[in-house]
Image (cartoon, rainbow, N blue to C red):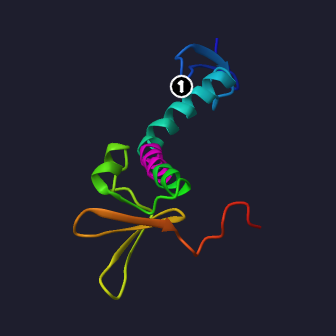
Amino acid sequence: MPTKNNTTMRCNFCRKSMTGRADKKFCDDGCRNAFHNMKSGESYSATRKINRQLRGNWLILKDLIEVGEEEAVMEDLERYGFDPHYVTSLEVREDGTTVYGIYDFEYTRDQDGVVRFRRDQRYPPRGYR
């Protein structure tokens, strides 16, 4: 039977009956963690999708640069999974050239669909401290 300081209520996650403080929301730590993980998973799913594609674009450029490539046709990049809609920066230079950035790489596109890419010189090489 509930008393002034000890009331019966239901867990916000599993809905089991529980007793305890009046402001108690979860029956145990497992339910509390599961509830918050579920709630944050819903709100961050779009961010995870975007970050996954940005990382994929970055890895494609990194792999090509590591084997000595400096340019490719956009259609070929897209076949590898590159999505040109996901960039981390965009700059229009005085000559009208648009430079797209993906973290520490940058690339430009010409009218024929040729993409020229390189590591952005504003960023130090990996391992630099």
Residue in the foreground of this view, choosing between 123 and 72: 72
Position above or below: 17 against 65: above
Can you identify the residue that label 1 sits on? 12
Position above or below: 33 against 16: below
Position above or below: 103 against 2: below
Q: Which residues are magenta?
A: 47-58
Q: Amino acid at mark 1?
A: Asn
Residue in the foreground of this view, choosing between 30 and 77: 77
Residue 115 in the image: x percent, y percent?
35, 63
- Specify the quadrant that holds the C terminus: bottom right
Q: Which residue ends up furthest to the bottom in the rendered image?
A: 94
Q: Badge 1: how crowded within 10 Å, few (<14), some, or many (20+)?
A: some
- Specify the quadrant that holds the N terminus: top right
Residue 21 in the image: x percent, y percent?
69, 27
Drawn side of residue 11 relative to residue 128, left or right: left
Residue at screen point 70% across, 26% down: 5
Main secondary-structure element of the magenta-colored stretch: helix
Residue 25 visible within the image: no
- Based on the picture, tell me whether residue 37 belongs to the magenta stretch: no
Position above or below: 93 against 99: below
Residue in the foreground of this view, choosing between 17 and 62: 62
Query: Where is residue 86, by image quadrant?
Result: bottom left
Residue 45 in the image: x percent, y percent?
44, 40
Residue 14 in the image: x percent, y percent?
54, 17
- Based on the picture, tell me whether residue 49 belongs to the magenta stretch: yes
